[in-house]
């Protein structure tokens, strides 16, 4: 019997609002432990929460981008549990009426992943275990989170990964989260079960908590599917439990979880009133949605004639996509702009973070100006390349780098002179060529091209060199 993977994701996305969900403390990552806290986020007696409007707006934006229905009226609920990372002993979340419901995302293979809900809640503090003691940092307490919950619609590891990548990219385009997995601002709980292929009913699932790396998530799902399959094949049954993934050992283990057999006793948060999102506000937010990555990619392919692979790479970071867009608009052949960016600009932005920030020392109008020189045959591609390198090194405009003579063509007399010089200066290569070693011509070509900074026509140069080498000396 063959088994089919069934997987659903619950993804936490930390929102980059300026202040926390219920108080005015800053949300920025890091800081000396316990310096970004106040009586509200510490839940001291007598303190009262007030809901951050910006966080509600961000949640609605996420919902709109993922095709959800927005609840005109919702409320916050208390989820009660006792754990040291939660000073109030309850988390303010949303239970029966989330802000957003019933969305969907279409994967590149055409399969639709249904989004069950998106709700807004507060983050808990962070426990730091060291040498037998546990310290608590409450700076993260009260930072707004959204939880995006899919239906169990993934049928492969690849689908889960593609969804999570698209979710991250979409959140970044919206500007509502930086989604830095290493800082925990994007983390997923992964639910995994198996069922005999071709059957309808879902099997018993396990939930792997807090995956904050794409690679680990993939490995965890694969491991868990293997483990469950072994149990099922022996006629056993999988027990529903919460697991943690141990990357060093590539396996999962049950968590002694605060979740297990817990009754959270959800009830409406009495210190906050109904959350009302007016249709006008929803429409205003809808109007402010940026062009989303998938739409941008499709437009780059359609309007600029880019191959799918290039368009996909260019939309991975919003700033770079916009930089390309501005450059491409001003040139004859947008593929020239794509090529400069993918081959030269991209290499300079080493880390994910640098690419995300997209700080490029050459403004788009400078790059398009340079490309126009190529397209009007004033310079050749090698000169474009080297000039762009210098521009990226120095931030200088091309006008200051290219000399007036660079922009002039090269006269036949001048080319002849350069070829003769190259032959004289590279006597060994010249002799080798005369002795029948075709390859030796490369060195001579290179010498000419260096001398004229790539302006000479290669075919013409080659012909001329060959002619000169055949002349009797
Ligand atoms: P709970 O209320 O217990 O958290 P939900 O129905 O809200 O359960 O589901 C939580 C997550 O688990 C969702 O992402 C859902 O897609 C996923 N899920 C539910 N059942 C299964 C299953 N049998 N196999 C895999 N994933 C599942
Ligand atoms: Mg759950
Ligand atoms: Zn606070």
Image (spheres, helix red, strand yellow):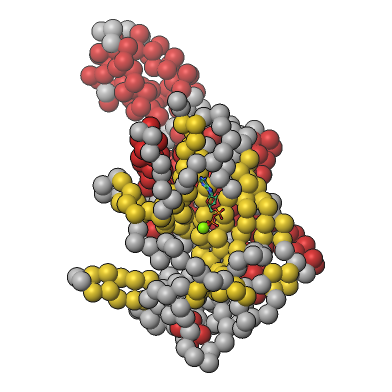
Tell me the residue at 38%/81% (across/down): 34
Q: Indicate the quadrant containing the N terminus: top left, top right, bottom left or bottom right.
A: top left
| Residue 132 relative to residue 461: left or right | left
Residue 194 position, x and y percent, is 47, 38
Tell me the residue at 48%/70% (across/down): 123
Say if residue 363 shows up in the picture.
no
> Residue 31: which quarter of the image?
bottom left
**Near-viewer residue (81 or 309):** 81
Relative to 121, does residue 5 appear above or below in the rendering? Answer: above
Which residue is the extreme one toward the front? 235
Tell me the residue at 47%/42% (across/down): 193
Say if residue 441 shows up in the picture.
yes
**Near-viewer residue (173 or 306):** 173
**Near-viewer residue (311 or 81):** 81
Residue 14 position, x and y percent, is 51, 64
Relative to 319, does residue 339 appear above or below in the rendering? Answer: above
Relative to 446, does residue 28 appear above or below in the rendering? Answer: below
Q: Indicate the quadrant containing the C terminus: top left, top right, bottom left or bottom right.
A: top left
Which residue is the extreme one toward the left? 131
| Residue 438 relative to residue 28: left or right | left
């Amino acid at each position: 019997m063959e088994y089919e993977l069934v997987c659903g994701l619950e993804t936490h996305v930390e929102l980059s609002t300026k202040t926390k969900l219920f108080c005015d403390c800053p949300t920025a990552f890091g800081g000396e432990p316990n310096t970004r806290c106040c009586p509200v986020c510490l839940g001291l007696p007598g303190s009262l929460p007030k809901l951050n409007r910006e966080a509600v707006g961000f949640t609605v934006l996420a919902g709109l981008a993922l095709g959800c229905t927005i609840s005109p009226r919702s409320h916050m609920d208390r989820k009660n549990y006792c754990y040291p990372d939660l000073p109030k002993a309850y988390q303010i979340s949303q239970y029966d009426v989330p802000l957003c419901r019933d969305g969907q995302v279409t994967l590149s293979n055409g399969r639709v992943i249904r989004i069950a809900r998106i709700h807004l809640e507060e983050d808990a503090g962070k426990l730091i275990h060291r040498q037998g003691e546990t310290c608590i940092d409450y700076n993260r307490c009260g930072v707004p989170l959204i939880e995006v919950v899919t239906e169990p619609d993934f049928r492969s590891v690849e689908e889960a990964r593609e969804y999570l990548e698209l979710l991250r990219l979409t959140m970044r385009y919206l500007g509502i989260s930086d989604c830095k997995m290493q800082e925990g601002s994007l983390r997923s709980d992964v639910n995994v079960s198996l069922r005999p292929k071709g059957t309808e009913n879902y099997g018993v699932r396990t939930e792997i908590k807090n995956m904050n790396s794409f690679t680990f998530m993939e490995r965890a799902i694969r491991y868990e599917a293997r483990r469950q399959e072994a149990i099922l094949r022996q006629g056993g049954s999988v027990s529903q439990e919460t697991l943690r993934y141990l990357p060093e050992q590539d396996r999962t283990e049950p968590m002694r979880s605060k979740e297990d057999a817990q009754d959270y006793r959800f009830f409406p948060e009495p210190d906050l009133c109904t959350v009302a999102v007016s249709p006008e506000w929803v429409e205003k937010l809808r109007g402010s949605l940026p062009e989303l990555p998938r739409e941008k990619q499709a437009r780059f392919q359609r309007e600029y004639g880019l191959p799918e692979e290039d368009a996909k790479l260019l939309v991975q970071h919003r700033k770079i996509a916009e930089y390309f867009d501005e450059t491409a608009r001003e040139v004859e052949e947008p593929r020239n702009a794509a090529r400069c960016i993918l081959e030269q600009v991209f290499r300079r932005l080493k880390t994910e973070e640098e690419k995300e920030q997209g700080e490029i020392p050459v403004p788009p109008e400078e790059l398009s100006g340079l490309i126009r020189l190529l397209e009007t045959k004033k310079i050749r591609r090698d000169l474009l390349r080297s000039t762009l390198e210098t521009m990226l090194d120095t931030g200088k405009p091309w006008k200051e780098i290219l000399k007036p003579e660079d922009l002039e063509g090269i006269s036949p007399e001048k080319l002849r002179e350069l070829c003769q010089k190259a032959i004289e200066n590279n006597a060994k290569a010249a002799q080798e060529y005369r002795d029948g070693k075709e390859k030796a011509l490369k060195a001579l070509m290179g010498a000419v091209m260096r001398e004229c900074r790539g302006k000479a026509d290669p075919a013409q140069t080659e012909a001329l060199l060959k002619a000169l080498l055949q002349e009797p000396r």
